[in-house]
């Protein structure tokens, strides 16, 4: 079974948590795509929900499929958010931000009662860090942050989009760092990174996830 199909079966399992009357957080990425598509179909069949999008790309897709998008301020609180991840470990800790939407994704997750992560089986790991950790930075500070992260041994690389710097929906930069060999506890690393002025957010999601749904072959593994 391909990764694409595993993403789809995980997404289809996750949308079972969505009911009429809910406010739903919509994640970003190729796995979230299948979830948004499925919710779009449910809406066509009468499901009544409001949704908050975690990226411009997601908002565009959801709107096209007839899903009503509202602002986070309007939503105030979300019932459930369904999103993908780049890596998920056994303790429900994640690396996110491969698609560059980590800032809005973390804000939406923080404001959601239930957070469901969907992924294909390649994303399930025993230790986070093979995937480079994305860090969102304010352009004014990015070059100096890269220097500082380099001096901490984190091998920072500013993300590019062709010849230009990659830009997030908030018009910030992304710096990808290597945390594989770091011996610092992830909670401490997160705290340390957040003390550097100009780092807006990191792709470490350590405490927000409630349910993980992994597509494995034709089946899903659901962890709660
Ligand atoms: C975007 C994300 C995505 O959830 C993550 O990159 C996984 O994407 P995909 O489902 O395409 O593998 O964090 O910022």
Image (tube, rainbow, N blue to C red):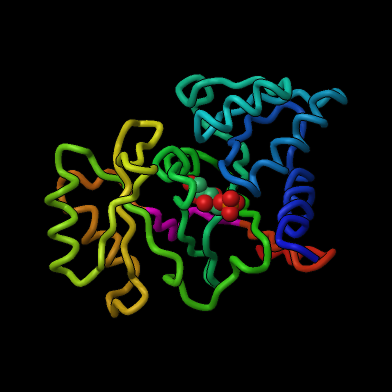
The quadrant holding residue 60 is top right
Instruction: In this rendered view, identify the residue nearer to me: 201 or 8.
Output: 8
Indicate the position of residue 129 as horizontal and vertical percent values.
Answer: 42, 70
Indicate the position of residue 183 as horizontal and vertical percent values.
Answer: 29, 80
Q: Is residue 119 left or right of residue 170?
A: right
- In the image, residue 43 sits, relative to residue 13, either above or below, namely above
Instruction: In this rendered view, identify the residue nearer to me: 224 or 134.
Output: 134
Whether the magenta-drawn stretch holds residue 207 is answered as yes
- Magenta residues? 203-210
User: Residue sitting at 23 percent across and 58 percent down?
Assistant: 193
Q: Residue furthest right?
A: 45
Q: Is residue 95 left or right of residue 3?
A: left
Indicate the position of residue 215 as horizontal and vertical percent values.
Answer: 74, 62
Q: Give the quarter of the figure containing the N terminus.
A: bottom right
Task: From the image, give the main secondary structure of the stretch colored magenta.
Answer: loop
User: Residue sitting at 76 percent across and 68 percent down?
Assistant: 216
The quadrant holding residue 2 is bottom right
Tell how many labels: 0
Q: Give the quarter of the figure containing the C terminus.
A: bottom right
Whether the magenta-drawn stretch holds residue 128 is answered as no
- In the image, residue 219 sits, relative to residue 76, either above or below, namely below
Q: Is residue 84 visible?
A: no
Indicate the position of residue 170 as horizontal and vertical percent values.
Answer: 35, 31
Q: Is residue 68 left or right of residue 146?
A: right
User: Residue sitting at 55 percent across and 31 percent down?
Assistant: 57
User: Residue sitting at 43 percent across and 44 percent down?
Assistant: 100
- In the image, residue 79 sits, relative to residue 61, either above or below, namely below
Q: Is residue 148 visible?
A: yes
């Amino acid at each position: 079974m391909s990764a694409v199909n595993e993403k789809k079966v995980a997404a289809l399992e996750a949308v079972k948590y969505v009911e009429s009357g809910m406010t739903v957080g919509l994640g970003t990425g190729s796995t979230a795509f299948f979830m948004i598509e499925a919710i779009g179909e449910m809406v066509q069949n009468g499901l009544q929900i409001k949704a908050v999008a975690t990226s411009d790309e997601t908002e565009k897709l959801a709107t096209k499929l007839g899903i009503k998008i509202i602002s986070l301020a309007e939503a105030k609180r979300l019932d459930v958010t369904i999103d993908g991840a780049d890596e998920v470990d056994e303790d429900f800790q994640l690396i996110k931000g491969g698609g560059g939407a980590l800032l809005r994704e973390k804000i939406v997750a923080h404001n959601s009662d239930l957070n469901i992560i969907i992924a294909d089986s390649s994303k399930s790991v025993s230790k986070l860090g093979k995937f480079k950790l994305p860090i969102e930075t304010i352009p004014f500070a990015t070059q100096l942050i890269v220097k500082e992260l380099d001096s901490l041994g984190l091998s920072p690389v500013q993300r590019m989009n062709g010849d230009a710097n990659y830009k997030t929906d908030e018009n910030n930069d992304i710096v990808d760092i290597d945390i594989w060999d770091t011996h610092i506890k992830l909670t401490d690393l997160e705290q340390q990174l957040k003390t550097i002025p100009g780092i807006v957010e990191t792709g470490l999601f350590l405490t927000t996830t409630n349910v993980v749904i992994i597509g494995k072959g034709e089946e899903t593994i659901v962890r709660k």
